[in-house]
């Protein structure tokens, strides 16, 4: 960000040319031209012929650059800085999405006349804009429990949260010219295929070999469909089926249909596994070295294996004050609040078997998973889905309001004949 005093505007103009003065910053003619050329390069010849007068497009692009400048200045005032690692990580992710290495991305950019440094600078710019928008809008955005409850009753949310079904389909055509036994043979084949599917044979291979449907070469996969998009012929069966289940063959004028529910997804089908877990933590300290800590946790493991009570040893030796008095008990937990090393050990642990000592940033642990259960998380998932939807709706509305406010309050003077060159006052009116 260039924060320029009036005395330096002339020097900048010599080097480039100023399109607009925006508070303590400037929008350069080169930026305006670059955006305009980028806009044109994305249009087809037919679209180019429909573009209105270039001055209209230039004015719109200039206004966008002015608004961005105001936001970037706001970010600097608030000390918002995007570090190099975040920029580089975003670049790596972008390259991966394009199925490129960083080196291949650099070469692709060079063919378009863009240096990698310019690319990284644009990433930093976009991340900064997103960060300041998020910070400023989140201060104004509040979603209450009542908002969530009301939104969940709306038809829009019902459609948003409705389950989706991935269906496998095989159609056995009945050739009327193949004799009176054609239908019987097709029914026998249908029975054979159902048995194969129930025995674990993948539908995809069977569909390629037997199906007369136009999805046969795709392995009979009908893709993901909302309930309203499932063919009425077998929609009732699909809605009642469990994943992997095969419906009884259904016959109509096209032939015999065999369907299998391959997958099912949606907020209302969300489940999660929780573990009843307890642990002992032994941490190094000013009076206990790393080696002594490891020796102690190994001794505790041996004593538990020899039959001593886990809870008693946890009360005496554990350095986790929140669980020590409860015998190391952490209650039922899905592990999301634990550090990765602890979470991994919890997932891998056998029920009733104390783990070998493992290290985290807090010290050395041993843990025991006493039980596991699958919980229905559908209500939590539905509430989270509603919260995200409300947030996204309100964020966009509040963002536009905040942008209008800072734009109205800014000092903006447009130069170089791109529009009126008179400065605007804080209310956005021309003097």
Image (cartoon, rainbow, N blue to C red):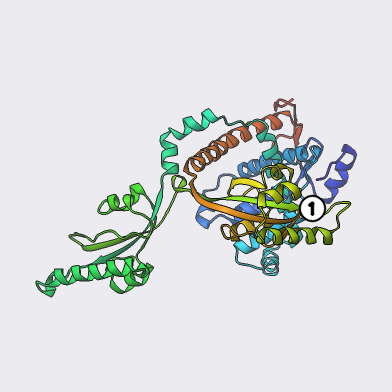
**Residue 61 pos. (x, y %):** 65, 44
**Residue 194 pos. (x, y %):** 28, 66
Q: Is residue 145 above or below residue 165?
A: above
The one nearer the camera, 357 or 147, is: 357
Res 281 visible: yes
Quarter of the image for the C terminus: give it: top right
Residue furthest to the left: 180
Q: Is residue 402 above or below residue 182?
A: above
**Residue 301 pos. (x, y %):** 70, 60
Give the quadrant of residue 357: bottom right
Quarter of the image for the N terminus: give it: top right
Give the quadrant of residue 407: top right
* Mark 1 surroundings within 10 Å by alpha-carbon count, few (fewer than 14), some (14 through 19), many (20 or more): many
Q: State the residue position of label 1.
A: 283
Identified at 66% across, 41% down, the residue is 64
Report whether 50 appears left or right of 191.
Answer: right
Please give the count of numbered marks on the rendered protein: 1
Report whether 259 appears left or right of 271.
Answer: left
The one nearer the camera, 89 or 310, is: 310
**Residue 30 pos. (x, y %):** 74, 50
Q: Is residue 229 above or below residue 196?
A: above
Report whether 166 appears left or right of 286.
Answer: left
Residue furthest to the front: 307
Res 90 visible: no
The one nearer the camera, 360 or 162, is: 360
Mark 1 falls on what kind of element? loop
Identified at 27% across, 51% down, the residue is 232
Identified at 84% across, 51% down, the residue is 15
Give the quadrant of residue 302: bottom right
């Amino acid at each position: 960000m260039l924060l320029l005093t009036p005395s330096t505007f002339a020097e900048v103009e010599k080097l480039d040319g100023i399109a607009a003065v925006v508070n303590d910053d400037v929008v350069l003619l080169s930026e305006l031209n670059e955006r305009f050329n980028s806009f044109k390069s994305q249009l087809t010849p037919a679209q180019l012929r429909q573009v209105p007068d270039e001055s209209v497009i230039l004015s719109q692009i200039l206004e966008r650059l002015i608004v961005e400048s105001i936001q970037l200045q706001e970010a600097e005032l608030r000390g918002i800085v995007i570090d190099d690692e975040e920029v580089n990580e975003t670049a790596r992710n972008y390259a991966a999405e394009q199925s490129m290495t960083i080196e291949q991305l650099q070469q692709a950019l060079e063919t378009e006349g863009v240096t990698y440094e310019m690319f990284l600078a644009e990433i930093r710019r976009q991340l900064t804009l997103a960060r300041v928008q998020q910070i400023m809008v989140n201060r104004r955005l509040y979603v209450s429990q009542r908002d969530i409850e009301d939104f969940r009753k709306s038809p829009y949310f019902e459609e948003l949260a409705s389950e989706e079904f991935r269906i496998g389909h095989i159609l056995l055509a009945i050739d009327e010219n193949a004799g009176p036994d054609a239908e019987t043979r097709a029914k026998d084949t249908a029975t054979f295929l159902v048995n194969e599917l129930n025995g674990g044979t993948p539908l995809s291979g069977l569909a390629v070999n037997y199906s007369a449907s136009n999805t046969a070469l795709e392995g009979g996969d009908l893709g993901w469909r909302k309930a309203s998009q499932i063919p009425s012929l077998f929609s009732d069966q699909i809605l009642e089926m469990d994943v992997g289940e095969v419906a009884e063959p259904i016959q109509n004028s096209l032939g015999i249909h065999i369907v299998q529910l391959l997958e099912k997804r949606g907020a209302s089908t969300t489940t999660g596994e929780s573990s009843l877990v307890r642990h002992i933590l032994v941490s190094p300290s000013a009076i206990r070295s790393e080696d002594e800590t490891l020796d102690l946790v190994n001794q505790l493991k041996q004593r538990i294996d020899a039959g001593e009570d886990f809870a008693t040893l946890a009360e005496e030796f554990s350095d986790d004050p929140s669980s020590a008095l409860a015998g190391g008990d952490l209650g039922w937990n899905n592990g999301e609040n634990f550090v990765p090393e602890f979470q991994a050990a919890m997932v891998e642990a056998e029920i009733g078997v104390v783990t070998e000592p493992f290290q985290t940033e807090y010290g050395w642990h041993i843990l025991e998973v006493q039980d596991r259960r699958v919980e229905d998380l559908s209500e939590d998932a539905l509430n989270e889905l509603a919260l995200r939807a409300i947030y996204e709706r309100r964020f966009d509305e509040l963002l536009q309001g905040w942008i209008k406010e800072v734009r109205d309050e800014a000092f903006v003077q447009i130069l170089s004949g791109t529009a009126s060159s008179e400065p605007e006052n804080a209310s956005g009116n021309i003097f």
